Amino acid sequence: QLQLQESGPGLVKPSETLSLTCTVAGDSIRGRTSYYWGWIRQPPGKGLEWIGTIHYSESTYYNPSLKSRATISVDTSKNQLSLRLTSVTAADTAVYYCARHHDLDEFDSWGQGSLVTVSS
Amino acid sequence: QSVLTQPPSVSAAPGQRVTISCSGTSSNIGKNYVSWYQQLPGTVPKLIIYDNNKRPSGIHDRFSGSKSGTSATLGITGLQTGDEADYYCGTWDSNLTAGYVFGTGTKVTVL
């Protein structure tokens, strides 16, 4: 059974960089060419926002509104993907989810989420 | 800002049917598959419909999806208290700055 687990600091200071890692268990990130892996966030009390998606070939796609600050990478040897978001502000406070993005269509398996608060 | 528009809320009595609309454009819903996600209070979003109208294993057939032109619809029949949740549509947008877009979300309340 596929499992995804986000990890990283729960508190980040304004203007600093948010870094999260998602560890994938139960399947290989390179399992199928149709497997892509994405990051989604949800500010408290608000809706879902797609951040970006990566393929194990390292093709990446980003939300235009975050593209200048977000970097998604993959480490196939560790079966992990990572997210870096630079120059954070309070508006970046959210629960951050990693998920499998099947064929760039549906997000069919989600991690439990990691709450990141941006505050001094 | 989401480019997929959903009603903020819908409600019905137990056993009734509700529908949730998701309105998009020719570059997103008009061109790509639509998915639907259920987020029960305090939990992780869960895929309940993919490829417009397919249900993942374990999802009850009370949930159905359809698409026509640039709009999609999620239907829930035999409404139960356990269906109270936020529901989001989502699809790929094939415009110049391609990417995935979620709907604004709809809160379903069982009266």
Image (spheres, grey):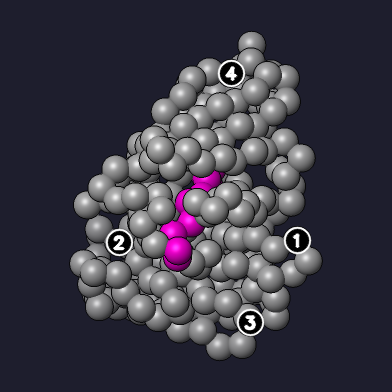
Which residue: 27% across, 76% down? B62
Q: Read off the residue under disc 4.
A: A12
Do labels 4 and 3 touch, CB within 8 Å?
no
Dot 4: what SS? strand
Q: Is residue A24 left or right of residue B9?
A: left
B32 w.r.t. B37: above or below: below
Q: Are marks 3 and 2 on the same chain?
A: yes
| Label whose residue precedes the other's in the sequence (3 or 2) | 3
- The magenta stretch spans which residues? A33-45
Q: Tag 3 or tag 1, which sits nearer the N-term?
A: 3
Q: Mark 1 is on which residue type?
A: Thr
Label number found at residue B30? 3
Tell me, yes or no, whether the highlighted magenta stretch contains residue A35. Answer: yes
Q: Disc 4 residue type?
A: Val
Judge if badges 4 and 3 mark residues of a common chain.
no
Residue wearing tag 1: B97
**Mark 3 to mark 2 CA distance (whole Å):** 28 Å
- Check disc 2 and report its element: helix, strand or loop: helix
